[in-house]
Image (tube, rainbow, N blue to C red):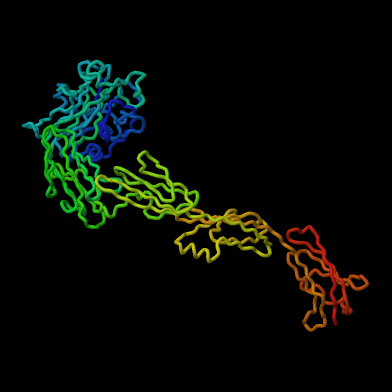
Amino acid sequence: MKSLFCLILFFVSGLSTNLYAQISVQNANNPTEVLNELAGAGVIISNIEITGQQEAYGTYKKTAGSLPLDKGVLITTGLAKNAQGSNNSASKSKIWGAAGDADLDNIVDMPTRDACVVAFDIKPTGSKLTFRYTFGSEEYLEYVNQGFNDVFAFLISGQNPAGGLYDKRNLALIPNTNVPVTIKNINDNENSDYFQDNTSSTSPYRTQIQYDGFTKGLFVEVDVVPCATYRLELKIADVQDDEIDSGVFIEKINSPLPTFDANITADYGGLLEGCAQREIKIKRVLNDKIESMRLNADGEAKLLEDYTLLYQGVSVLQLPFDFSMGVGISEKVFTLIPKADAVQESPEKLNFYLEYGCSFEKIGQVSTKIIDVSEFKPISTASGENSTRYVCGGTGSITLESFSGKSYQWTSQDGTFTCLDADCKKIQTAPLLVPATYSLSLSIENCNFSQNITIVPIPQDKQVEKKEFCPAEPATFIVYTPAEEDILKNEGRTLRYEWSRTQGVTNNQLTVKSAKEEGIYVCKVYDQISGCVLREKTFDMTITCKPIFEIPTGFTPNGDGLNDNVKVFLTQVSGFELRFFNKWGECVHIARNANEAWNGKIGNSPAPAGMYIWQASYSTPLSPDVKLSKKGSIILIR
């Protein structure tokens, strides 16, 4: 027993003779999803109807490899998802017990079952409808020539341009014959160029697709009347019974359209007045019919005022312009000539449209600009737009590139360069220490242009500053003086400061106030426009903290509020002890308070006037474990 897999896949790109990709199938939610996958270029599809189980049709896409089933629609007499690889069954099948189709009954003269039908109206813009398809089946190869096989057909109804009507004419034919595509007519022995066996263990497709065999390289091409409405029915069904699936893969349905073949925009963005002309070619793939077309334009550039358009050597006087292509003609050529109007103006946009089809719809566009020669600069804006450029002195260089033309000639004053291509369209300047001017002479068809570029090297200033500091006396280091900064700002420079060993410092100065900050600091100042280092300044910071321990030579402890106590003046001193001795060498007082070292008393009694000897011991914050000493004398006056 067998069943017809009702599988119609509609996908974006054409099927090729090689199928090397796995497909993923999803059930379609509604007929609109199928319609969207069917409609290709130059057609309008409407009034779509689908007959078949909802699980028997859906959408699919390629997920890996090189099978050309990129994306599309699937309809099937079985389960749509059964089309997915691997080929792990010789007779994959789903029985629905549904009705067949009368048209397919008549084709095979047998009853059909589980029919799947996608029918719709289609309105072509051109004179043909085309699409590619592949038929696959689980009936291959064991049911070849067994008397009956699953059946499918593509039936078209509507006006025949040769006269009369198409009345459900079957389009699923072997190329250049009237023989329908069936398992009997395409297999490993009959028309084998169109067949791919998928049962062999060496088949590269066994893990990709379920069917035991499938066709390749099949297509439909049918003559139609442009703008007429046709009914197209895509049908497939089981014959006699419900078992063993078959399917058809169909790409998007198109009506081939003429196209533009034109390059009317040079690398400088358009066409130069009075310098060049370009061909606008309109081409078509099929040339066995007479077809009418129309060339139209819009934009700021005006016909006869800003440009001339020639057709077969004669000037076109107005747009739109109607023309036709006869039998055997595949190309028509227009010549676009920008006019030198001696009016200085900005580039003017110009868009050409090809109008074709039922209501002369726009089906293609090419665009350009008409450029005033007085505004044109031959050095590409990719090299920058300023006539003066800056580089880093001694190291920096610039790539200068010409727009495309017939010939290029570069010269230089005070500088050298290297050609980067064979015709010296692009050059690399050498590093400079002094300004240099580079000149380009460019020939573009009938016109010659020149331009000068001055390159100015930015000198780099390197400085080193050494300074001693003490944590108690923070040191501030400055890269530029205010006057120097003002000069740079007046030159239009934007500065960026980059300090080593620091985070968050982005300005002109750095303050150091910790013993841990001793060492080398480097600040680089960048010109943000050119990226050059304007100044690199190195700061070598060394800690040299000298302790100071000073005592006055006399004091008057008489209660008048003036010099009543001995005060010690300290810098970078810690942990001090001060002893006072009388003339007999007796210690009369020990002080550890710098502001009130001695009030002139021994115990609670006033000390006699006279000279006293003092002796101090102390340490510094940098060397707290090292004791220093100092001594001297002081006079007590009463």
Q: Quadrant of residue 456?
A: bottom left
Outermost residue on the front side: it is: 413
Give above or below for 473 relative to 252. Answer: below
**Image side of residue 143 versus residue 101, left or right:** right
Q: Quadrant of the N terminus?
A: top left
Q: Nearer the viewer, residue 440 or 393?
A: 440
Q: Residue at x 30, y 21 (%)?
A: 212
Tell me where residue 53 appears, x and y as whole percent.
25, 33
Q: Quadrant of the C terminus?
A: bottom right
**Image side of residue 231 versus residue 135, left or right:** left
Give above or below for 363 relative to 475. Answer: above
Outermost residue on the left side: it is: 164
Tell me where residue 449 appears, x and y as whole percent.
30, 50
Count of numbered tags: 0
Q: Residue at x 40, y 49 (%)?
A: 412
Q: Quadrant of residue 541?
A: bottom right
Tell me where residue 509 appears, x and y as whole percent.
57, 61
Tell me where residue 174 appears, x and y as whole percent.
19, 23
Q: Nearer the viewer, residue 170 or 351?
A: 351
Q: Can I make out residue 605 in this image?
A: no
**Image side of residue 424 versus residue 528, left or right:** left
Q: Can I make out residue 22 in this image?
A: yes
Q: Quadrant of residue 519?
A: bottom right
Outermost residue on the right side: it is: 584
